[in-house]
Amino acid sequence: MLDYIIVGQGIAGSLLAYELLQAGKKVLIINDERLPSSSQAAGGMFNPVTGRHLAKTWLADELFPFLKTYYPAIEEKFNASFFHQTGLFRPYVNEKQRTQFLNAIQKHEIANYVSDSTDFENSSKFIVNELGGLNTADSGWVNVPELLKALKQYFIDSESYANEPFEYSDVEVKPESVVYKHYEAINIIFCEGFYAKNNPYFNWLPFNPVKGEILLVETPGYDVSQIVNQGSWIIPVGPDKCRFGATYSWHELDFETTEKARDTLQDKIGKFFKMEYKIISQQAGVRPSTTDRRPFLGKHPEINNMFIFNGLGTKGVSIAPFFARQFRDFLLNGKEINSETTIERFYTLYQKS
């Protein structure tokens, strides 16, 4: 008998499955590769200081030291390359913003994360930054598709992966196990991202999904290794290639790319990017965000062997490692889940069937 069936092989399901397998548990991931995935269309950026007011990211002091060792350890284990701590440069828009940002460093006590910088990496050839900008050394990006590719091969090699659609009607909950078709496990964990909207066991949770689109562009001669962010961002992803991102839409929640998003990104990037470029491709994904911007971890209100790990939203790369480990410790050792993430905070929304 399996210990866990995990539904979904996005970043949440993949890291949780990895944690459980490393702990010696028998795991099966069920993943429908025909479905588009937001993880495959993710920019993958991590940044401890975000927003117009330079707010420190939630739990930054815990999340970022953890991810900086977690991802490289997986890279080393599987001889992969997907973690890029490049730093992030945020050019000032004008003198007013420069003053506001410098004041915010003191006000929000983030001097250990950001610093005032002049022409960082000689980027003025490519970026409008006459006033300089802020440098965040602990920022970077994860090539999420490469991460998931490495983990998928590990799951296949461990005989822990099944590529097939998941049918909720085939779930049979027993007192001591969960039976799904010809599989039986002690527990089942749903890590479906946006598709949780179709899950009859957890669709009562207050998701607030947001669609995002990004561009992959050709940028001959561009040699800035840092991410550049001025409302929209430029991530260098390879020789003469960058990603532009990202849009946000709470409507039209699908995986179709739009001309409107492409025009929006080109307009925003064009305000600070000097280079000519060629669009190679465009991707769209729907991020599984939540109403309070906190993940969903925990046990179903009535079914003791059914769990969810979802709602990582726009900061999945930053959040997933820390909470995959914490959720593993909850499942195996009964350790407490962070009170801001446990779904117990929404049990009052659940209507018994």
Image: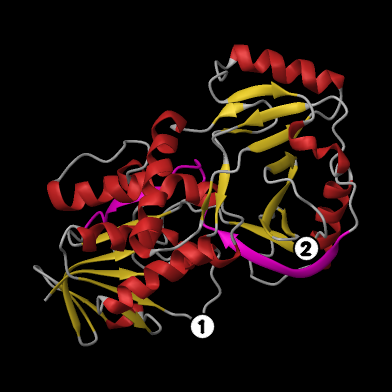
| Quarter of the image where one finds residue 172 | bottom left
Amino acid type, mark 2: Val
Amino acid type, mark 1: Arg
Quarter of the image for the C terminus: give it: bottom left
Quarter of the image for the N terminus: give it: bottom left
Q: Locate residue 80 relative to residue 3 in the image: left or right.
A: right
Image coordinates for residue 267, horizontal then vertical, percent: 88, 51
Q: What kind of element bears circle 2?
A: strand
Which residue occupies 86% across, 60% down? 277
Q: Locate residue 275 relative to residue 317 in the image: left or right.
A: right
Which residue occupies 81% across, 62% down? 262
* Most foreground residue, 243 or 249: 243
Q: Residues within 10 Å of mark 1 (few under 14, many from 20)?
A: few
Vertical placement of 69 versus 174: above or below? above
Vertical placement of 293 versus 7: above or below? above
Vertical placement of 227 versus 248: above or below? above
Residue 291 sits inside the magenta stretch: yes
- Confirm whether residue 199 shows in the render: no
Image coordinates for residue 63, horizontal then vertical, percent: 41, 37
Q: Does the CB distance between marks 2 and 1 fall below 8 Å?
A: no
Which residue occupies 27% across, 49% down? 327
Mark 2 vs mark 1: give the one in front. 2
Q: How many marks?
A: 2
Q: What kind of element bears circle 1?
A: loop
Image coordinates for residue 18, horizontal then vertical, percent: 30, 61
Residue 217 bears which disc, if any? Answer: 2
Give, as a single range, the part of the protein colored magenta.
Answer: 277-302
Residue 181 sits inside the magenta stretch: no
Residue 34 bears which disc, if any? Answer: 1
Sequence-first tag of 2 and 1: 1
Image coordinates for residue 70, horizontal then vertical, percent: 37, 47
